[in-house]
Amino acid sequence: MLLNQHLNTQPLINLKPAPTPFEMKPIFRISWLVCAMTLVAVVGRSATRKISLSELEDKIAGAWTGQMVGNIYGLPFENKFIDQPGNQADWPYGYTKNLDKLAQYGGAFSDDDTDIEYMYLILMEKYGIEPTYGQLREGWMHHIRDRVWLANRAALGLMHHGFTPPFTGRREINPHWYQIDPQLINEILGYTAPGMALYSAGKSAWAARITSDDWAISPTVHYGAMYSLAFFERDPRKLVESALAYLPANDRYAATVRDMLALYDKYPDDWTKARQQMARKYYVDEPEMTKTIWNANLNGACGILSLLYGKGDLQLTMDLGCAMGFDADNQTATIGGLLGVICGASALPKALTMPVEGWTKPFNDRYINITRHDLPDASIEDMIRRTVAQAVAVVKAKGGKLSGNTLTINTDARFDAPLEFCIGPMPRLERGVATDYSFSCSANEMHRWSVASGSLPEGLTLTGNGRLTGAPARAGKYDVTLALSDGQRRIERDFQLLVRTPNLAPSADSVLANVRTVNKDVLYKLWITFGHPMYADHVEVIRDGALNGPGSVFYSLAAAADIPKVDYFGYSWSEPKRIDMIAFHTGCMEEFGGWLSSLWIQYRDEQGRWKDVGGFTSTPALPQSDNIFIQPHFVEFVLEFAPVTTTAIRIVGDTKIQEHWNKATKGTSAFTSITELSVYEAIR
């Protein structure tokens, strides 16, 4: 009765997504396109599969329950085993300290390996089976207020800055693009597409770009395909091998998966040797810029080894997932859910699904939200029924049908991303300087762009594929409305293009700063999350034109910080300049600091005294809070004010002090992260 009620869903939205000035490298984008166009022939599947509603529900129940098992089982081992794996003599690990927590809450409790997927279920119910990037952004900003890290936190900060996916995952502005994050949150896209691996792979790739880019989306795509295929395949190894067809042949992660298969074949009875070689290749010898314990490729490899050596046994697979180490709870949640689909909830061991005495249903049929704003606690059985309803809706919308208790699936279905404008960094236009900027991204690069109203700056042209080229002739602000069409529908959006005067910073006689050289002894003792090549030695980099990448970020870290700390950055010239605009470009933020809690602008008057410029506007607006979870990496704030004539100008700000970290960092949590400070003469 309840299942049938949930199947009566509202009309579905079937749209398509978004623009990117910089996204994947062209070769990678083309590889994904060719891969998608040839998959049906490569995989050689029949066009339809059938599954009963009762089996579908059992497998989706297994997905939710298995994820909860893996997340809560693995949580005590998160980041615990790095240099060496866990000890097999300690197996089974059990729920350890989380057993008391399960009893305390009277059910499963939320964590970042299940709660965003629960949020995605709610957003699918609200907007339809294919929410837009814009709708997912609104969901993120409303429901996610804290307890996200790395690429997820970076994406959230960029959302609050005004950007939408896929910009929020783009490697140029999300410096954690290569981390594990999308593997935590996208499994629901696979188990709402039963037997539709091509659709699931495409949708997983699209969703993974919310937080990630390039090869870091590939584990999510691979898992998405495996989840979809697992409705009809019980052998974990066959799943791993079959899902490789949904990755480009030259993909980094595809090569990693093949490497894991070879290691398993070489050491079929010794997982520790396989783990040792895997860790050396993908952690110890990983390039410095992407070497972290949360690397997507590394942790994806851990999950594959756990699947292979676990041989379909949930308990064994959970212990292997923990012992493989690194971000253990992520891989145990992902592969736990996958085994749940393979086996179905009815076959999962009660010792893992009902670990508290007196429970008669998996996790006491309770999912308790302790992590996300405005997400209700839920009955797990109700979550399962609601997810089944979404899966049926996906199948029906993509060429399948429901006849009685049997669901017929179109296994050749493809994912077409919703049609929408997406917002990211606007082009940096300078009078007389050639530009080559693309409004489009991988999701809408096939669509047609045009100018609907207004005028582009003189000297610039917009091509049909969304590329802006030429050299603007005059500085100023230009309002223009662009149109985007997929051949059936047309949408419009207003943009304002800023053409700047030449940047005065490179011609300055000196850079002004209270800290000129980063103290790397201090830096490397802190809990930094970026590769060492990211950090610059000297403040001079704030005018070298490099907005991101190796050596681009200056941290104002000295030997010790006197708190509260005020930082300043600016320039001086031998001849007066008439200035009305400064552009402040942030660097990468750490959990313990890097951003300003206040900002003002000063100039040197004729008597050599520093004076405030008075009021100024910021585009976009400066963050409305100094909360860590809304601070954006690698973004620009354009600060405009009444013109001043001066020989020196600077920005000044109070650095945010993270009390949680201040004792651990001995006061060094007060610092500024900056990549560039540009200064512009007023238009005469």
Image: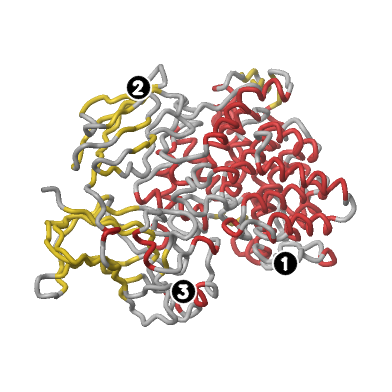
- State the residue position of label 2: 490
Say which of 500 and 497 sits in front. 500
Which numbered mark, 3 or 1, is in the foreground of this view? Answer: 1
How packed mark 2 is, by other alpha carbons closer than 10 Å (few <14, some 14-19, many 20 or more), is: some
Q: Quadrant of residue 50?
A: top right
For image coordinates 64% across by 53% down, the residue present is 330
Tag 3: residue type? Answer: His
Q: Amino acid at mark 2?
A: Arg
Q: Secondary structure at mark 2?
A: strand
Q: Which kind of residue does numbered mark 1 sit on?
A: Asp
Is 444 situated left or right of 76 in this image?
A: left
User: Distance between the Cα atoms at labels 3 and 1?
Assistant: 27 Å
Asked if 304 appears above or below 272 in the picture, the reply is above
Q: CA distance from mark 1 to mark 2?
A: 54 Å
Residue at 68 percent of width and 64 percent of height:
77
Query: Disc 3 on helix, strand or loop?
Result: helix
Task: Say above or below: 632 vs 80.
Answer: above
Q: Image height check: is 551 above or below 15?
A: below
Q: Which residue is mark 1?
A: 83
Asked if residue 318 shows in the view, the reply is yes
Q: Is residue 515 left or right of residue 262?
A: left
| Element class at badge 1 | loop
Residue 139 percent coordinates (x, y)? 43, 45
Q: Nearer the viewer, residue 673 or 574?
A: 574
